[in-house]
Image (cartoon, rainbow, N blue to C red):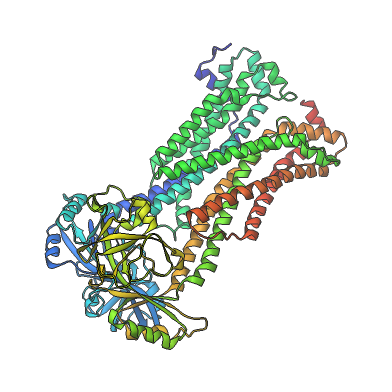
Amino acid sequence: MSETALSWSTAWTIARRDLSARFRGLRLLLACLFLGVGALAAIGTLTGAIEDELKSRGQTILGGDVQIEVWQRGATPAERAELEKFGKLSGGVRLQAMASSDETVVPIELKAVDQAWPLVGRLTLSDGRKVGAPAPGTAWVSPDALARLEQQNGGTFSLAGQTLKIAGVIADEPDRLSEGFALGPTVIVADGFPEAAGLTAPGAMYRSKYRLLLPAQRDPVATIDELKAKFPTSGFTYRQRDRAAPGADRFVSRMGEFLVLVGLTAMAIAGIGIGGGVSSYLEARRNSIATLKVLGATSRDITRIYLLQLLAAAVVGSLAGLLAGILVMPALGKALGALLPVAPGIVFDWAALARATAYGLLVGLVFAAPPLLAARRFPALALMRARVSPLSGQWREAVWPVGLGFAAIIGLTLASAAQLPVTAGFLAGAIVVLGLLGLLGWALRKLAARLPRPQRPLLRLALSNLHRPGAQTGSLVTALGFGLSAFVLLAVVQTSLSANIASRVPQRAPDYFMLDLPRDRAAEMERIVLAAAPQAKVRQVPALRGAILAYGPENAMTRVADLKEIPEEAWPLRGERGLTYSATLPEGNSLTAGQWWPKDYSGEPLVSVDEELAKAIDLKLGDKITIGVLGVERSARIASFRRIDWDSMGFNYVLVFSPNTLADAPHNLAATIDLPAGADRTQLLPQLLKAFPASSVIEVGGVLKQARELLTQVSTAILAAASVAVLAGIAVLLGAIAAARASRLYDNVVLRVLGASRRQLLLLQLAEYGLLALLLAGVALVLGSAIGWLVIVQLFKFDWLPNWPQVLAVLGAGLGMTVAFALAGSLPLLRAKPAQALREL
């Protein structure tokens, strides 16, 4: 009887009559899809809303349609004249400076703007005024700067020896996001101030930024191409309005992809729960299915009827998840507010919502297929005897549909991936881990069957329940092992990162960085430091800025401007970077190939390159590198490769040149100051600022504090995201209990008839789930720690410093939660009345 006797409409009529309006029996499927689809919908909607906000506000965020940036100089009159031909122009300066008020010294980000600024939008002050550039002699300051200077609106402070009046407090700065990371709060001044205060003297570290507002018909990309052709050696870097904040774009893209992968992990784990829930549902419908078969229903009829029921439940669960994901998005955006570049609006990302629904339906069908196909395969008599002779071979019937479903899920994931290698690696790793856990579940069942039986009856029964026919050991091991491993992974990564920053960095980082130290006053600076702290260590290096323009063999050099895409590992090719020269090998560096030049070297210009960059762009000894410094191209031959100790947090440069390459270029020095323990720090900073008003002194402790706060926020967000996987694991646990509930009910009834008390039955459940949890704890500890070691040591290049008490505490909490939910799910079985259960047998 392979032919179907029922049409789809007739099958739906039967399915609808049999299906409870409240989906009784399918609530676990609803819960799993609600959880998985809701998580993916919330993630997709949030990411789409942020991306839409960045795109729609791109012109405001950038402050125009095109931005031109150049280091350590301003645009020449000829360059400005060319720029003004394209549209309305606004220019200004950005630099690090030191502001002081009485005895308080604060590092700030100084932003000098002209009368045309801002080209788009207006600066909003705390009193509601909409303004542009401040008047000469005044400044707009951020609330943080006001607080650190211990001043009030209308007060004064000093900057580079000049007195400025606080004319207003910034409430909303339209182009703040495009300015990037800053080491201090913002202070905005008129464009003539930096030059008058000596902050833009030759060699000083500052950036000149120019924004263009183009006519409506002009294309920003075409404009940038024209500017590159006009100024090939100017050192200009460009940005257009749809890439107003590339750092924010990359962050949002990676955050979204990470969260999607977490959501898919939760969905995969929930899928196991769906399989258990469907098995439980069909077990409850076993007699109904057998009756339909006796009345003439074919296997295809049974498939149609119950497939329609499952699809109806899957659609309801997915739609409920979509609605919940959309509704929870504002709360999610608020919770992540400190980490997000912009406040997301309400945007319906239909593509993301469609993907979430597709994932939900595919996962539901993949994991529901084996029990459904088992129900259609077996004859009525086998179904009626299934309670005492469990059905087997479910997966043989489901190999093709399950395989095609998995292929569709993997294809959909890879097709929508922003970073294909990362996503593919994650999927491969997840499949391997799930496969290992599945193999472990099978091995545990075999091992439990072969172990000697304990003398104590409860332990003997608990052990036998792990390998009995119909036992859910495999699905429990897979789901809970994955969830607990994820918790261990997060714990070891978070504690290792915190330990590296808290204990390792302060031991090696200098106390202060000093920027823009005049070369001819280096000895004076060192005298001031040693007078305040005789045991202090001062290190001074030449500091320049420049961009890599070309690299490779002398006769076949690659121009960076011709590259369609710059690899992630070749980040020094993006824009201008710090440059230096040295007669000796820098501290914390070691040669890996080639030789260092003599101290009195005066031959062909040479350069030593970081070995990681050399690998990324395939450099060889003897190749050449061309850089642009202050609009002048300079070339040097590669003499050596170096390994850099980035952990030292001192001056580490990707490119170090021989002195004769750059010594004639205008530049200042940068310095690090290491103070001995117990040194008086209160007077050093004011003394340095008084002697060098145009220089900046940055306290490393403040920077590290920002890093710790950011790390804490990121860790909290990751932990919250991963909790979705744990919730899915709980759903699987409940599904496994539900799938075995019928057989467990009669086991308990038999034990009750034989004299077992409810307390003994509860202890039996506790022993079984406790034994399984303890076995999983060891596996989760090994798997999570192994993956965490790869992340910390191989990816982050940090020391392996997990806090094992905290890791074990997290694992213990997960185990306790597992056993508690398992026992809670088993309580209804203890309340069953033997007489009623035996009558239904």
Does residue 187 lie above or below 257 as drawn? below
Residue 698 visible in image: yes
Classify residue 604 by image quadrant: bottom left
**View extreme (right): residue:** 755
624 or 689: nearer the viewer: 624
Q: Residue at x 28, y 55 (%)?
A: 623
Q: Position of residue 399 (x, y in %)?
A: 55, 25
Q: Where in the figure is residue 76, as x and y percent of width and height?
A: 15, 67
Q: Position of residue 754 (x, y in %)?
A: 87, 34
The picture quadrant where one finds residue 661 is bottom left
Q: Residue at x 65, y 51 (%)?
A: 814
680 or 156, nearer to the observer: 680
- In the image, taking residue 789 as reference, residue 471 lies left or right, namely right
Say if 408 sits above or below 775 in the image.
above
**Quarter in which the N terminus is drawn:** top right
For residue 516, what is the image quadrant?
Answer: bottom left
